[in-house]
Amino acid sequence: GEYIPAIIQLEAVLEASSGHGFIAAELDLRVRIAALLLALGKVDDAIYSLSLDLELAKEQDNYQFLPELLKLLSEAQQAAGNYVGALEVHKEFHEASMRMHDKRLLLGTQIITAKLDLERTQQELQQHKARLHQLEDSNRSLQVQVHEDVLTGLPNRRALVEEMAMRLTGRTEN
């Protein structure tokens, strides 16, 4: 392909974005440039660039493409005939891949746990709402029972006493 024009474009974007605090994006661009250098057969340049990128990635502490960077560096070491270096980087690649895998599993577990907690809370809320409606219905029923005779449905003595007290206090105030 047209690697050189792609490298020139990526370097222009890298230069324009440098110094704006987008370190991970800059690192991604640098790794892409190094991959193109490797594809062009400029193995030593690719190794040098990827080694610098690796140091920057380690400083980032949470660079999400670290395994891909290490894999590319291992391939570059192999292309240079440095099999010992390639093996060391490949081991580091494997460890980084496992850490990323573990982080994804942990995050997945946390998401599932949060969903489960949310579901339990929603069920508890529904139970509390049902209990609240039940209590409200019971209170309405008790209010009716307090003032009505159960058999006849007519006002009972309490209702009569309350009505008389209300009318008497209303009469004395007038």
Image: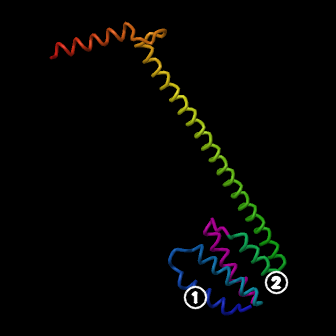
Q: Distance between the residues labelled 2 and 1?
A: 27 Å
- Residue 127 in the image: x percent, y percent? 58, 33
Lower sequence index among marks 2 and 1: 1
Tell me which amino acid carries mark 1: Ala
- The numbered mark at residue 12 is 1
Q: In this view, does 27 lie to the left or right of 68?
A: left
The magenta stretch is: 42-64
Magenta run includes residue 44: yes
- Residue 94 in the image: x percent, y percent? 78, 66
Tell me if residue 50 comes above or below residue 138 in the rendering. below
Residue at horizontal 62 percent and vertical 74 percent from the top: 56
Q: Quadrant of residue 80?
A: bottom right
Report the colour scheme: rainbow
Residue at horizontal 70 percent and vertical 79 percent from the top: 50
Residue at the far top in the pictured view = 157
Q: What residue is disc 2 on? A: 79
Q: Is residue 102 left or right of residue 119?
A: right
What number of labels is visible?
A: 2
Residue in the foreground of this view, choosing between 84 and 2: 2
- The numbered mark at residue 152 is none
Tell me if residue 17 comes above or below residue 135 in the rendering. below
Quadrant including the C terminus:
top left
Residue at horizontal 68 percent and vertical 54 percent from the top: 108
Residue in the foreground of this view, choosing between 42 and 55: 42
Q: Residues within 10 Å of mark 1 (few under 14, many from 20)?
A: few
Q: Residues within 10 Å of mark 2 (few under 14, many from 20)?
A: some
Residue at horizontal 54 percent and vertical 28 percent from the top: 131
Magenta run includes residue 68: no
